[in-house]
Amino acid sequence: MAGRIPQYFIDQLLDRVDIVDLIDGFVPLKKAGANYKACCPFHGEKSPSFTVSQDKQFYHCFGCGANGTAITFLMEHNHQEFRDAIETLAQQAGMEIPDEATSNKPQVKTKTEDGIDLYKLTEKVSDFFEQQLKNHPEAEAAKQYLKNRGLTGEVAKRFQVGFIPDAWDTLMKEFGGTEKQQAALLQAGLLTKNDDKNRIYDKFRNRIMFPIQDYRGRYVGFGGRVMDDGEPKYLNSPETPIFHKGAELYGFYPARGEIRNQSLAIAVEGYMDVIALAQYDINIAVAALGTALTNTHLQRLFRITPNIVICFDGDRAGRQAAWRAMENALPLLEDGRSIRFLFLPQGDDPDTMVRQHGKETFMRLVNEAMPLTDFLIDTLKEDCDLKTLEGQAKLANTCKPHIQKLPEGVLKTLVMERLGKITNIQAESLNTNVAHSNQTNSNQNTNRSQGNQRQVIHRGNNTPQLSLISRAISLMLQNPKLARTTGDVSVFLNTQLPGYRLFAELVQTVTQNSGLNTASLLERFRENKHVKTLEKLAIHPHNLDENQLANEYQASIEKLRESLNELELDMLINKEQNDGLSQDEKIVLKKLLESTKKR
């Protein structure tokens, strides 16, 4: 969503908004040295550990780890979506969000060129479908189907279930009287076009219709289900300017309040599962729209609850879907968040389970669901003979790339300890292997030559150690203008060593955009998979004044360049011994050797 608002506007907004004034309106702040302090609004505490930096325009809680910018604060504290937070800040700052998007991403238009609002059009169509279920003579089969599935009229009305008869032009006749109206229906995904014959006709025919609302309650699309054995069983709206199935969850809008109250969300596979659970007063269910649960889906749920149970069929397809969801979930599984899996018996789904056994039994199964990390390890154990050393090594190696995706924290440590007990490998060794599992043998040579990289200054038992590249990133994040003293970063872009490319991208972002502070720089990397690490590095304590910070940064850059030179030197020497060098490579080798002698 960030791409739909010009980046320059977000920079200007964060430059105009004072995070201290913003947060002080929710939590009274007190001056504490260069910063401001309060009791954290995100967890209960008696002594203040919540700090707000006016210089960095950034907040951080040393108790629960919450941190971010003014935008993040509104998203987390007020449970707002990204754009809503931008709109709130813009209104406070007296700024108007530009209509035009960035040059590399076209603006999303929710109105046609003729001024027809696609949201309002889709809502009118939803009302029409609902009336068709009540009044159309062909709707009796649909009503009987819903009754057979145990739905009452009250629940059908709550979810605004509708019907479209078996005709090619139902919507065309009702809403498509002019070419402009037909164009709007096409843009909304309600009509479709035969490219060969240039014929336009209804997208949905002879189906029970389920309107899909976005997180703000706007009508964005539909799902249609057949009442017999026809295919496809479910047909969703296509991607449109207002509907993106990888971002929306069926049932989210009506369930969001109860999910927040119960601090639990249940993700199921289909529309009927959501509605059937609601029939039994389980009003915390949502469903993906024909896709695996995406990162966006999970983030949206985590914004209102730390606890998610994913309920799938226990067959092979269900477990494959669960595995895809798990892979998307791992980077989001911070301490305090929980994702569990409930696999139902073969042939059952939430609809049949709750109707046959009732709410109490179903919720007991939900509460006993398998933690995500157990699902990860248990699934991979199936292909490993743990009675042998080879099987134990195989499990450790297959688990590593998945464990790497977990954010740093207690959970990741506990997973490593459990894996260590299963494989009889000490957790310290596993941690070392995980940290370097993406490095090639040549990178291992670099580790040998980079002994100084891991020597950091200890400033108390609670200060985590930083690698040299992490230290450089941290120093630059805390004083972005240092980036302009870095020099050429192309050498950092061309290495596969972890963190180097990210560092170069941060430097380039600052040098190409004047006036960025810590907050605006982090906002530009909001969608980056390493954003949580960057946020932690932005508040890492260095205990240095501004001059010391600059000197430390320059020293770090020099050591980074030296380590890369040593890596290239090792590679060229190995190649010379095995394959020989080209003339250009010989010149490079000579320069590197001379440089080494000077040091």
Image (cartoon, rainbow, N blue to C red):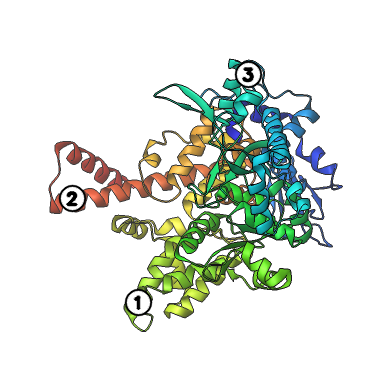
The numbered mark at residue 177 is 3
- Relative placement, left or right, of 379 versus 384 is right
Decide: marks 1, 3 in contact (CB < 8 A)?
A: no
Q: How many marks?
A: 3
Q: Measured from the top left, where is residue 324 in percent x and y? A: 48, 56
Position of residue 415 relative to residue 101, above or below, is below
Instruction: Say what secondary structure mark 1 lies in.
Output: helix
Task: Tell me the distance, in whole angstroms, between the alpha carbons under discs 1 and 3.
Answer: 68 Å
Quick one: label 3 or label 2, which is nearer the N terminus? 3
**Residue type at mark 3?**
Gly
Give the class, few, some or many, for how many residues have Cα within 10 Å of label 3's Cα (few <14, many ≥20): few
Q: What residue appears at the point 54 percent right and 51 percent down from the top-left corner?
A: 228
Instruction: Say what secondary structure mark 2 lies in.
Output: helix
Give the class, few, some or many, for how many residues have Cα within 10 Å of label 2's Cα (few <14, many ≥20): few
Quick one: label 1 or label 3, which is nearer the N terminus? 3
**Is residue 8 visible from the viewing direction of this image?**
yes
Q: Measured from the top left, where is residue 593 in percent x and y? A: 25, 46
Mark in front: 2 vs 1: 1
**Residue type at mark 2?**
Lys
- Relative placement, left or right, of 91 versus 321 is right
Task: Tell me the distance, in whole angstroms, between the alpha carbons under discs 2 and 1.
Answer: 35 Å
The residue beneath circle 2 is: 575
Task: Tell me the distance, in whole angstroms, between the alpha carbons under discs 3 and 2.
Answer: 73 Å
The residue beneath circle 1 is: 391
Quick one: label 2 or label 1, which is nearer the N terminus? 1
Q: What residue appears at the point 80 percent right and 39 percent down from the top-left corner?
A: 22
Q: Measured from the top left, where is residue 598 in percent x and y? A: 31, 45
Q: What residue appears at the point 31 percent right and 58 percent down from the top-left corner?
A: 445
Quadrant hosting residue 64: bottom right
